[in-house]
Image: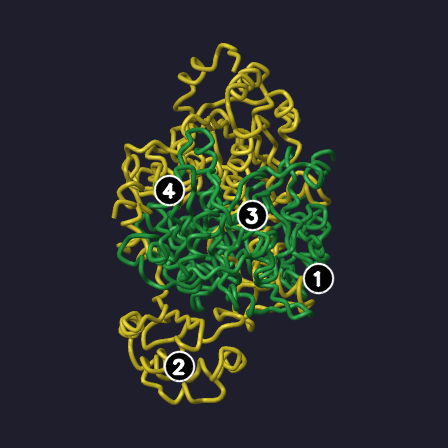
Chain colours: A yellow, B green
Amino acid sequence: MTEQLDHLNPDQPYPLEGITVVDFSRVLAGPTCGRMLADAGARVIKVERPDTGDDTRLMGPFAQDGSSEYYRFANLGKESICLDLKDPDDRAFVKQVIARADVVVENFRPGVMARLGLDPAELVEEFPHLVVCSVSGFGQYGPLHQEAAYDTVIQAISGMMDGTGEPDRGPTRVGTSIADILGGIFGYCGVVTALCARERTGRGSTVDISMLDATFSVMEQSLMEALGTGERPTRIGNRHPSMAPFDTFDCQDQPIAICCGNDHLFGILAKTLDLPGLSDDPRFSSNVDRTDNQAELKDELQAKLRTEPAETWHQRLQDAGIPSSLVLNIDDTRKLGQIKARGMVKQVGGFDVPGSPMKWGTWNSMGTMLPSPALGEHSDRLRAEFGAATAR
Amino acid sequence: MTEQLDHLNPDQPYPLEGITVVDFSRVLAGPTCGRMLADAGARVIKVERPDTGDDTRLMGPFAQDGSSEYYRFANLGKESICLDLKDPDDRAFVKQVIARADVVVENFRPGVMARLGLDPAELVEEFPHLVVCSVSGFGQYGPLHQEAAYDTVIQAISGMMDGTGEPDRGPTRVGTSIADILGGIFGYCGVVTALCARERTGRGSTVDISMLDATFSVMEQSLMEALGTGERPTRIGNRHPSMAPFDTFDCQDQPIAICCGNDHLFGILAKTLDLPGLSDDPRFSSNVDRTDNQAELKDELQAKLRTEPAETWHQRLQDAGIPSSLVLNIDDTRKLGQIKARGMVKQVGGFDVPGSPMKWGTWNSMGTMLPSPALGEHSDRLRAEFGAATAR
């Protein structure tokens, strides 16, 4: 398809070409925002502490050559300059870089940028075209804004952890640092929205992203219940709160996910599983009935599904048009033809890294093809380029 | 703080004022994209099927007046027009609306828009300023692109479900429709990036978002392991893969999340828990040691933590500066002073709804203050406004 060729065509320009970002952020949330900007074609200059750089350079998992995959994933396509932000000369220098940049990203604790002479609101006042994005655990104001936050703390306080897992077991952490990453993604949303508004009005802006706000805002059913019905939500395992069958089910060897969102699909499911009695059973005659009696329905379905392997059932369900999937380990997911066709794993600098999920017909959508930088790799070049104060 | 006043100041303009969106999407993923555009101040015209409208109008949870919270959360601030897209007159009409719009959002199965005479690539060809965003389970091309997908199917196939939960239990669904919602958020990212590029170049674009791409791309540690080390990742419960203690721990009454990312914090933790022996224990002397012996460490910590309630420990840990949190039910999260201070719950049309996590200093950041529409509420007005063909 021509669409596909357009997306993966490396000769297309990137959508954010010409945008320069100064990225002061460390570890995961802020760097994810900067990485997305690099994936969209912005030039991203990462400012790192001399000698050690970003903490994640020493964090695993490590590739065979000893380099950190953690650092690599969050910093692809960036340039690295070592600056001591407590040194007046380096601070004066970084102001010259900022004066010629479009975006600043940082994820220090609130107040640290101001103590470094780089208060976000003051930067926007001094450089009215600038977008300055701060990502933090709780945001730049409010009673908790000075609290330290790691991903697990935000998953705990946001309701995300309490809402995940089986009702008879404890709260469950999502198996990725979703609060950090949502902070980074919403940072990207906030920055690009502000850039779009700047193109239309000439006005820059601060952007203040809270990982708690971000994580809270993606809570769906449980937040609807808490805000809308006044009921206190509870964990319900893998099933859907208002559709059935819509869950994982045990087969002979491993579980399978099956989703029937309506009566039509349920009828086909009963036929495909050779369980004609299900369609006539009054306990299961409508989606509301099936949800009310989902435990009994699950027992009936599993009694049958346990007689054969998940792969056998998956083939039959797929042929019948019923949404289903094996529960894949990510080591199998990465090998899917679909992941390959979409460029969602790519080789950059000799390493396999994830692609970008933003696919544009008009613009290069491979994400950045530049590796993550060695510590201070671009210090000399950047000092030469930005060394003389230059009016924008 | 002035920042706060700026964010919540309803007299500020919104950043996307003047942008018009035609939203053909249904249920959750596409509507989330449209809702975010409305939150940023775009005008969003939702096209609904006559008589029934969006499926979610009939989906719970329901408010006391019988209206769907599900529909409301995903469609705040939109205008609703009923159109029969199989009717030639209505199709001609909707083309007139599109001709004057900036953005189209849809989440039909790939190919449906083309069959309706609204092929995304052709629309951009006809209206070169237009951004047309398609959100689907697997994207518009690739071997799986025609497969039906619900959130649970994508959580299963993406590795998200397999990576979440305890090692001795089965794969666990994240307690929100994270794959749908990430599809919507990355849809917003793709649209606003394309709008920004359009302002700079004059060129519109298609945007092709796959829920699988989006969910796969946020997998962190497990994807690093699969791509970087060749090891097959496994579920590890609530703990962090490479930091300890960084987990949930049982107290007398309920669990608490405690995160010590370095030796300094661990020393303070040992002091705060009155467990001086921990600091001298060679099993726990560095973060690598603590991670290697995290099970023994957890036992030692829990033996102490179980002697008092979580709230007591939380106060002490907070006073000592150690990142920690109770594991809150979202019904308690929504009542936090921090959530209130940030406008993350607001009253719109008499209902409590979530706010927007994008906070700009220059722009109104309350998110839309308009309610979700009744079915076809704006049909007459929109037919009058867009009825005559008008050149853009």
Q: Amino acid at mark 2?
A: Leu
Contact (CB < 8 A) between labels 4 and 2? no
Q: Which mark is residue B385?
A: 3
Say if residue B112 shows up in the picture.
yes
- Judged by depth in the image, the label closer to the viewer, 3 or 4, is 3
Most foreground residue, B332 or A48: B332
Q: Which mark is residue B264?
A: none
Identify the residue at horizontal 65%, vertical 24% (top origin). Answer: A122
Q: Report helix, strand or loop for mark 3.
A: helix
* 10 Å crowding of disc 4: few (<14), some (14-19), many (20+): many
CA separation in Å, label 3 and label 4:
23 Å
Quarter of the picture containing the N terminus of chain B is top right
- Residue A47, horizontal then vertical, whole percent: 49, 26
Q: From this view, report whether residue A202 is shown above or below residue B234.
A: above
* 10 Å crowding of disc 2: few (<14), some (14-19), many (20+): many
CA separation in Å, label 1 and label 2:
44 Å
Q: Amino acid at mark 3?
A: Glu
Q: Report helix, strand or loop for mark 4.
A: helix
Most foreground residue, B221 or B168: B221
- Judged by depth in the image, the label closer to the viewer, 2 or 3, is 3
The residue to which callout 2 is attached is A301
Co-location on one chain, circles 3 and 4: yes
Q: Report helix, strand or loop for mark 2.
A: helix
The residue to which callout 4 is attached is B124
- Judged by depth in the image, the label closer to the viewer, 1 or 3, is 3
Q: From this view, report whether residue B167 is shown above or below residue B279.
A: below
Identify the residue at horizontal 52%, vertical 34% (top origin). Answer: A196
